Image: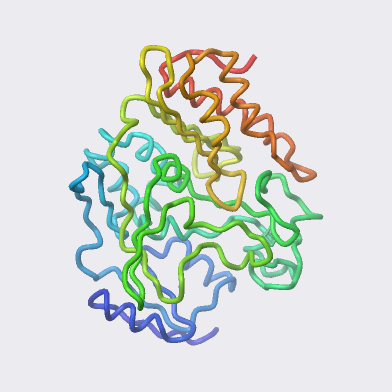
Amino acid sequence: MDPISYERAADLNGALRSAQQPGSMYIGGGTNLLDLMKGGVTRPVRLVDITRIGGLDTIATLPDGGLRIGALVRNSDAANHALIRERYPLLSQAFLAGASPQLRNMATVGGNLMQRTRCPYFYDTAFAQCNKRLPGSGCAAIEGLNRTHAIFGASSQCIAVNPSDMNVALAALDAVVRVHGPNGERAVPIGEFHRLPGDRPDIDTTLQMAELITAVDLPPPLFSEHAHYLKVRDRASYAFALVSVAAALQMEGSTVRSARIALGGVAHKPWRAIAAERMLTGHALTDANLREAASSAVSDARPQRDNAFKVELAQRTIVRAVNQAAGRTGGFA
Ligand code: SF4
């Protein structure tokens, strides 16, 4: 076993100082990181415990009417918070679709953003090929079992998917991630926070060295009346999404005034279906135009050998999630 040093940061500046030492990693709830360490997938030299830093475990309204969720807020607390349930039901539903109650009680919002893929070849060190775990070693999934892998945005280096439900809802809501680092504070739109794999699949996010997530900001609520998170998985709980859809609408009668659609389980990052959103906006929500929009959402899908079913599943899940969000019945004939 490799020796690991442990420091409990008393404040933000202390955490940033400690994390600048080589081999350091932040630890919050630890629900993903400890699994990775036990499996020998991730080998930090120093753990910087951020759980005692004050002010990161609160949820507060912002002057513009939005909401700031501290990075140390537990997933279960966020899911059940009155303001999130009332104003951002999409996010509450996504939290509750993730993991198990025990894990949600420990896992933090910041840690959820940093979740690593559940590609089995990444977690099993018996496999020599995994560019995410061992850069330059190859990708066992491309020729291996790839039923759960990406249909969008993959590269010849990695076809893994982001496993988070929360991230999909945050993408639909245009959340902003607040980070602090040695050079100060910055705000990162959620769409720019996670990376596509490209030729560096070992890097999941655009965080810089020692930067720490401090909060997630939600814009003023626009979709509290018409939102639905739909997760399709192999079993009813404690399973990652094959495909998930976060759908949020503003409606005027039967006309869509604005639409947000984000997909999970299909790419290295939450995948916004911008073309589908545009096709719905300004039009009456009918079965025909919804199916057309769903079809446009997968027009650039590039499935792997085992996961072509996700192309059809994504369309069906979009149709059902949007219908649920709008309060319509209807599916995919
Ligand atoms: Fe590793 Fe990515 Fe290939 Fe999975 S898909 S084996 S995480 S490189």
Quadrant containing the N terminus in the rendered view: bottom right
Give the side of residue 25 with respect to residue 60, left or right: right
Relative vertical location of residue 3 with respect to residue 136 in this rendering, above or below: below
Rendered-image quarter of ligand 1: bottom right
Quadrant containing the C terminus in the rendered view: top right
Which residue shows up at 31% across the image and 30% down it? 224
Which residue shows up at 65% across the image and 27% down it? 295
Judge by depth and name the residue closer to the eye, 179 or 315.
Answer: 179
Q: Position of residue 8 (x, y in %)?
A: 29, 78
Give the side of residue 108 with respect to residue 196, left or right: left
Q: Position of residue 134 (x, y in %)?
A: 67, 73
The quadrant where residue 287 appears: top right
Which residue shows up at 36% across the image and 64% down it? 213
Instruction: Report the label total.
Output: 0
Instruction: Determine the residue located farthest toward the front in the rendered image.
Output: 282
Relative vertical location of residue 284 with respect to residue 158 in this rendering, above or below: above
Colour mapping used in the image: rainbow
The quadrant where residue 234 appears: top right
Q: Position of residue 317 (x, y in %)?
A: 57, 28
Give the side of residue 275 with respect to residue 304, left or right: left
The quadrant where residue 11 appears: bottom left
Judge by depth and name the residue closer to the eye, 250 or 106.
Answer: 250
Q: Position of residue 309 (x, y in %)?
A: 71, 34
Relative vertical location of residue 53 with respect to residue 107 in this rendering, above or below: below
Which residue shows up at 27% across the image and 35% down it? 87
